[in-house]
Amino acid sequence: MYDDNNIFARILRGEIPCKKVHEDEHTLAFEDINPRAPVHTLVIPKGKYVSMNDFVEKASDTEIAALMRAVRTVAARKGVDASGFRLIANNGVDGGQEVPHLHFHVLGGRVIGAMVAR
Ligand code: AMP
């Protein structure tokens, strides 16, 4: 079940401000409020999708392609396309997902380090 009052839904409705990096018909990208790296931008679909499972099951191919292309656009806009970046999508309880609207973290601007804590 999608929670219409999750923080990203409220950002999409313009009820809460964000520092926008990119927007197109199907996606929005904005700066993470608590950046863990010099570049930390979130890329989200505009549709109401909780997780990757939800997105892949319900989104159109156009929406899925748009999200992937938006990641590429953000990496270029933030200047990390050549230096590299980490793309993270936390999913569900074990994945540590806090906001129940699918989002990709684009992290870069330094060597990000180990993939996961052991
Ligand atoms: P996750 O743990 O993958 O669900 O990540 C949620 C992310 O959303 C965290 O990195 C938060 O810092 C970020 N976040 C929470 N509220 C906001 C907000 N109002 N604007 C931008 N980023 C936010």
Image (spheres, helix red, strand yellow):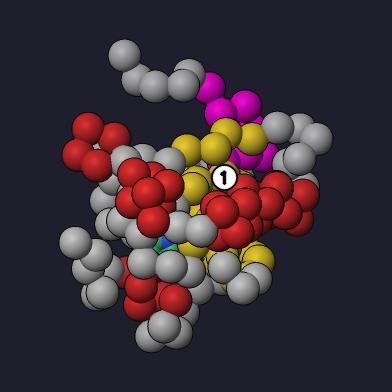
Residues packed near mark 1 inside 10 Å, few (<14), some (14 to 19) or many (20 plus): many
Q: Secondary structure at mark 1?
A: strand
Label 1, on which residue?
106
Q: Position of residue 62 (x, y in %)?
A: 60, 59
Depicted 92 relative to depicted 33: above or below: above
Q: Left or right: 3 with respect to 28?
A: left
Left/right placement of residue 101 relative to residue 32 reads left
Residue in front for this viewpoint, 118 or 10: 10
User: Going by the picture, which residue comes out furthest to the top?
Assistant: 118
In depth, the one of 11 and 59 nearer the eye is 59
| Residue 65: image location, x then y, percent | 62, 52
Residue 25 position within the rendered picture, expressed as x and y whole percent measured from the top left: 61, 73
- From this viewpoint, is residue 36 visible? yes
Q: Looking at the picture, does residue 63 appear above or below residue 114? A: below
Let me know if residue 102 appears in the view. no
Residue at point 27% right, 68% down?
Answer: 6
Say if the magenta span includes residue 99. Answer: no
Q: Amino acid at mark 1?
A: Val
Tell me which corner region of the image, top left, top right, bottom left or bottom right, holds residue 52. Answer: top left
- Residue sitting at 50 percent across and 73 percent down? 18
Query: In which quadrant of the rendered view does residue 66 lie?
Result: bottom right
Quarter occupied by the N terminus? bottom left
Q: Which residues are magenta?
A: 107-113
Check the image and report above or below for 59 versus 110: below
